[in-house]
Image: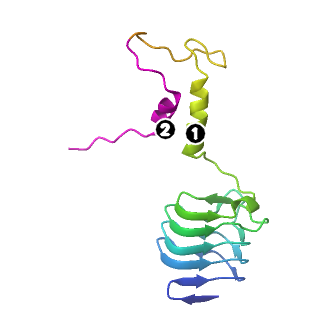
Amino acid sequence: MWIQGSHIDLDRTRVGGVWLRRATIGYLCAASSTVIGRIDLQGSTITGELDLMGTLVRPPSPDEVMIDLSDAQVGKTVLTPATDSMGLVSLHARIGTLQDLSEAGLTRNSTAPTVLLTLGTLYFSALRCGTTALGTEGICPLKPGEHPTWDPFLYALDLLIPPARESGT
């Protein structure tokens, strides 16, 4: 293990946890390490790379977060924990490049907006006034001669964009 300036190298070490909340780091490597606990980088900024290739992470319980990047900003993330790792990964972060997720067998708890827009467009394209593919009522104009042309893409997009907040003035 070595620490030099804003570089932290835990390559092939065994630690009880990594807690660097709201830290600013240039590079953090824990590749091929064993972390008995969790890796908590909430609110941190890693300007270079976060390397967790082959890292074995074991939080106290398999239902707990093992890697927490909530509100973090990371330039590049190599996120391939060892297959024996247990726990959840919180990726509510800004990540420039995310590499090697497929080898880890990680699953997502949310669906990307790009995916939701496509599914929404396909679903609303199948709607017909009075009937849907599921046999339920579809979207019908309130006044047949006064409504704009139906656009399933724009309707799905409108549903995904959060409403503007009103100013408190």
Res. 41 in view: no
Residue 116's mark? 1
Q: Which residues are magenta?
A: 146-169
1 or 2: tag closer to the N-terminus: 1
Magenta portion: prevailing SS class? loop
How many discs appear? Answer: 2
Kind of residue sitting beneath label 1: Leu
> x, y percentage for residue 147?
40, 16
Q: Secondary structure at mark 1?
A: helix
Q: Are marks 1 and 2 in contact (CB under 8 Å)?
A: yes
Q: Which image quarter is the N terminus in?
A: bottom right
Residue at x-position 48% and y-position 36%: 157
Where on the picture, by quarter, is residue 51?
bottom right
> x, y percentage for residue 57?
71, 69
Mark 2 Cα shell of 10 Å, populated few (<14), some (14-19), many (≥20): some
In the displayed structure, would residue 98 be above or below residue 142?
below
Residue at x-position 57% and y-position 11%: 130
Per the image, the residue denoted by label 2 is: 160
- Whether residue 15 is in magenta: the answer is no
- Whether residue 151 is in magenta: the answer is yes
> x, y percentage for residue 42?
52, 66
The foreground one among 121 and 106 is 121
Q: Residue furthest front?
A: 149
Residue at x-position 60% and y-position 68%: 77
The foreground one among 60 and 129 is 129
Applied colour scheme: rainbow
Where on the picture, by quarter, is residue 8?
bottom right
In the displayed structure, would residue 49 be above or below residue 1?
above
In-image side of 8 versus 83 (left or right): left
